[in-house]
Image (spheres, rainbow, N blue to C red):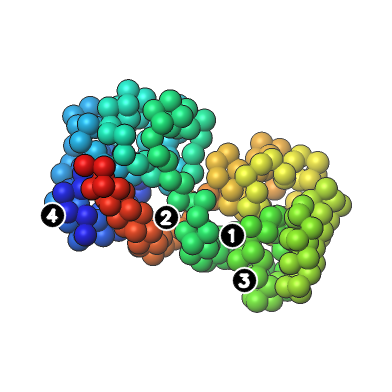
Amino acid sequence: MLTDMQIAIIGGDARQLEVVRKLTELDAKLSLVGFEQLDHAFTGASKEKIEDLDFSQLDAIILPVAGTTADGHVDTIFSNEKIKLLEEMVEKTPQHCTIFSGITNPYLQNIIDNTKRRHVLLFSRDDVAIYNSIPTVEGTIMMAIQHTDITIHGSNVTVLGLGRVGMSVARTFHLLGAKVKVGARKPEHIARVTEMGLTPFHLDDLANMVSDTDILINTIPHLVVTAKVIAKLPVNTLIIDLASKPGGTDFRYAEKRGVKALLAPSLPGIVAPKTAGAILANVLSQLLEEVYENRKEQS
C-alpha cells in the first residue's frame, strides 16, 4: 500500500488513467495536473494547476512517456492549458522525490542533473519495453494494413534495429508470412537474425538492400532512413517509423519523392491505451513502493 504517499501525475494520455486507477487503489494521495477536461472522478485524487501544486510535499512526480517537450512543456490530452515544468519547481521537492518518465531529453535531463533528484526511465527497463512491444506490433500491423493495397503475407518487409521492439516486429511479420530482412550493427544481432530464420544485413549496406521493399519499419531513434536510402526505395513503399520523435526518417525527402512515411512513436497509447496503461501502472506501483520504503527509513 502507498498510504499517505503524495504523488503528482502531470499530463499524459489515456494510459495515465490506468496509472491513476491503480495508485488510488493503493491509497496514494494524487494531484492530477492537466486533467481539467477529465470527467471521471477518482477517490483520493484532486485536479490542480501546476502553479498551485505544493512541490515541497511530493514523494514522486509521474510525467508522460515522452517526459517533456524540448522546451519543457508537458503534453496532455485532458487540458487545453499549456503546462511547463520548471527547474525551480523540482528544486522545491524533498530530496527523496523520484521523477518517472518513459524517456528523457536535454531539457528534462538538465533539470534532473541540477536538482540531483532520482529519475527513473521506464522505457529503459526491459520488462516495460518488452511488454510494450506487444501493442506496438499490433499497431504496426494495423497501419500496414490500412496504408497498403497488398497483403502482409508474401510482402517484402525490412526492419531496422533488433532491439526489444525490432525483434518483436520482425518475428511477428515473419509469422504472418512476410519475407523479412533485418538491418542491424552488432554482430550478436546479426547472429540472432540468422537464428530467427530471417535475412540479416549490416546497416551500412542499407541503401543497397531496399530496392524491393514493400514496407520499411524503423525502430532506431537516429537518422538512418536518409534521402540516399529513400531514393532507392520503390515509390509505393510504406515507411512506418516507430522511433521516438523526431524519428529516424528524412520525412521531408520522403514527401518530396512521394513515398508515404508515417511517424508512429506512441502506438501503444493509441491502439491499446488500457493495456499499455496497465503495463505502466503495474511497474510504477512496484517502484513507488520502493520510494515509500526509502521515505520511511529516512524519516
C-alpha gap between disc 4 and disc 3: 41 Å
Determine the secondary structure under disc 3: helix
**Residue 109 rendering spot, x and y as whole percentages:** 48, 32
- Tell whether 2 sits left or right of 285: left
* Residue receiving disc 1: 165
Instruction: Provide the secondary structure element on which disc 1 rests.
Output: helix
Q: Nearer the viewer, mark 4 or mark 2?
A: 4
Residues at marks 2 and 1, CA–CA distance in whole angstroms: 15 Å
What is the three-letter code of the residue carrying label 1?
Val
Which residue sits furthest top? 88
Residue on which disc 3 sits? 172
User: Which residue appears farthest toward the left when viewing the image?
Assistant: 43
Secondary structure type for disc 2: helix
Looking at numbered disc 3 in the image, what kind of residue is underneath it? Answer: Thr
Q: Is residue 169 above or below residue 16?
A: below
- The residue that mark 4 highlights is 43
Q: Residues within 10 Å of mark 1 (few under 14, many from 20)?
A: many
Pointer 1 or 3: first along the chain: 1
How far apart marks 1 and 3 lie (CA) works out to 11 Å
Residues at marks 4 and 3 touching, judged by CB atoms closer than 8 Å:
no
Residue under the point 38% across and 59% down: 283
* Quadrant, the C terminus: top left
Image spot of residue 86 (x, y percent): 35, 25
* Mark 4 residue crowding within 10 angstroms, few (<14) / some (14–19) / many (20+): few
Query: Mark 2 or 3 closer to N-term?
Result: 3
Q: Nearer the viewer, residue 50 or 290?
A: 290
- How many discs appear? 4
